[in-house]
Image: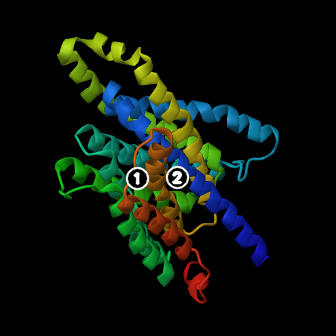
Amino acid sequence: MEAANRKQARRHSLLLVLTALIWGTAFTAQSAGGDTVGPYTFNCIRSLIGAVVLLPVIQFSDRLQLSKNRPVSSKDWRTLLVGGAACGAALAAGSNLQQMGLYLGSSAGKAGFLTACYMLLVPVLGLLFHKKCGWNVWVGIAAAVVGLYLLCIKGDFSIQFSDLLLLLCAVVFAIHILVIDYFAERVDGVRMSCIQFLVCGLISAVPMCFSDLRSCWADGGLGVWVSALAGLDAWIPILYAGVLSCGVGYTLQIVGQQGVNPTIASLLLSLESVFSVLAGWAVLGEQLQGREVFGCVLIFGAVLFAQLPFRGNQEKEK
């Protein structure tokens, strides 16, 4: 039984690593899409696309009876709707804060570092919900933060208003991880993911109307906004982020977090920054400095060290 649980935990951990890989490669698309159509418009459309993409997945899973925790009773549906709405509200707040931080001038590297600080906050907030973790996890977190700094921050480190938005975004994403941890074992993950994207898209539509559309109206009318949405420069990053980052990535996060300590999950998801840099090196030909290579190695080592089964730590993490 214990061996089966370990095998399942490894499988779920691999899903979270795959999630980080998808998010890391989608970071450039997120930045480019927000610059083209506006941050709230980008988040609204990509979230709604993520919801639509999952509808046939839900039907396919039901037909093959692959869905876990498929809602049957009114109580099941109520739990699913509450979980999806809570995740969607947290996702809307976090993603829009992140998008605004990028839009107002934070570099992609600094955005990746500050956003990933949620892995410091998850274990602290988790203590409020009796989610303890072993000493090796705390050591892994500290090492990963150092690695992220070496990987993402170049030159002097100063905090601007856009960076404060990203720090607030990290707080919200930490809450998002804990909300998923609470509901993941109680509901069907794909259905909850679909609902969260629908809620996130609808919430993002409000600031889209009052910010992006208003700004375009001042610059020449609604046609400016429509024109920005008409080009491939807008739709390539929107579709990439909507289908992969939302539809696939966030669904894998919900499924992967089942049975995984939220602190371990946050460490695994922090690999997003590593994959982002490695994708730039492999695809775009960007050069990696020695400190960046060391930062990648340090983060990978921290993730592995945090998951080592030291005696006495398993009981704490339950």
Q: Is residue 33 visible?
A: yes
Residue matched to label 2: 20
Q: Secondary structure at mark 1?
A: loop
Q: Is residue 228 left or right of residue 20?
A: left
Mark 2 vs 1, N-terminal side: 2
The image shows residue 20 at horizontal and vertical percentages of 52, 52
Q: Is residue 246 above or below residue 111?
A: above
Q: Position of residue 168 (x, y in %)?
A: 29, 55
x and y percentages locating residue 155 in the rendered image: 22, 56
In what element is the residue under mark 2?
Answer: helix
Q: Is residue 111 above or below residue 100?
A: below
> What residue do we see at 53% from left, 30% from top?
49
Residue 185 visible in image: no
Name the quadrant of the N terminus. Answer: bottom right
Amino acid type indicated by mark 1: Leu
Looking at this view, name the residue that lies furthest to the bottom: 312
Between 165 and 189, the one nearer to me in the picture: 165
- How crowded pointer 1 is (Cα within 10 Å; few <14, some 14-19, many 20+) is rated as some
Q: Residues within 10 Å of mark 2 (few under 14, many from 20)?
A: many
Residue at mark 1: 288
